[in-house]
Amino acid sequence: MNNTVMTAFNIHLYLFWENCLFFLSATSFFVAVAWAWKNTQPFHLPQPFPRWFTPWFSTMQVLGGLLPVAVMLLWGVLWGYTSVFSVLLWYFVMLGLQILSESITLRLFYSVVWVMIPYLYVPYRIWQMYEGVKLIGSTNELFWVHNLLILEILLWTGNYVLDVSQLPRLFRWDVKHNSDININ
């Protein structure tokens, strides 16, 4: 068997098992937490959404979705770089499983566990992109793919910071503004 094909097969198999292990661990964690929190109030998203939501969501769809799809199709399928295809395929599989997990917990069970899902999946996605940088390498042919993966790391890190900053809003915590604080 060709060494390149075997390497591509090994990368794909490695990523398969790694992602399966993460998914099973994360799902088990969410099920355990949902059971432990079974007596909490049903969770509903705070309405209305803030003004920044639409531009942020559009940016995430374009830079976190459409751009990687284009790269996966060009480099991974059309130009035959199987490692690029494997890395981005698993990126989309895990992104899809995150969205599915969020939909089930929020829309089917109305569970506050929904808030926790990005706090496990997004750091894992950052890890996926970092690992992709290592697996793909920095050859001249894959310069743009390498840069895309770095962009994705920065994008998802920013998304994670935004997610964390939204905790008070999601849990409807009272937040006092500086003008409300009385310092004696």
Image (cartoon, rainbow, N blue to C red):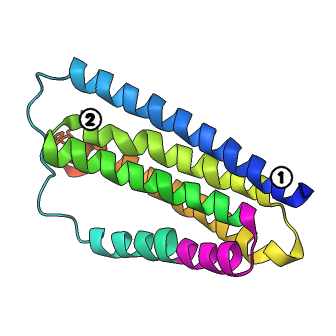
Q: Quadrant of the N terminus?
A: bottom right
Which of 173 and 157 lies nearest the eye of the viewer? 157
Horizontally, is 110 left or right of 11 in the view? left
Q: Is residue 68 magenta?
A: yes
Secondary element under disc 1, as helix, strand or loop, is helix
- Residue at image coords 57%, 60%: 89
Which of 130 and 53 lies nearest the eye of the viewer? 130
Looking at marks 2 and 1 on the same chain, the residue that comes earlier in the sequence is marked by: 1
Residue 25 x %, y %: 47, 29
Residue 8 x %, y %: 78, 56
Q: Quadrant of the C terminus?
A: top left
Q: On screen, 1 above or below 116?
A: below
Q: Is residue 1 magenta?
A: no
Q: Nearer the viewer, mark 2 or mark 1?
A: 1
Horizontally, is 142 left or right of 38 in the view? right
Give how far apart the Cα atoms at labels 2 and 1 are. Answer: 40 Å
Determine if residue 19 is in view: yes
Furthest toward the top, the residue is 36
Query: What is the span of residues highlighted in magenta in the rendered image?
Result: 67-83
- Residue at image coords 68%, 45%: 13
Would you identify the image quadrant in which residue 95 lies?
A: bottom left
- Residue marked by disc 1: 6
Determine if residue 176 is in view: no
Would you identify the image quadrant in which residue 144 lies?
A: bottom right
Residue 4 x %, y %: 87, 60
Q: Are marks 2 and 1 in contact (CB under 8 Å)?
A: no
Secondary element under disc 2, as helix, strand or loop, is helix
- Residue at image coords 22%, 21%: 35
- Residue marked by disc 2: 113
Count of picture labels = 2
Which of 76 and 136 lies nearest the eye of the viewer? 76
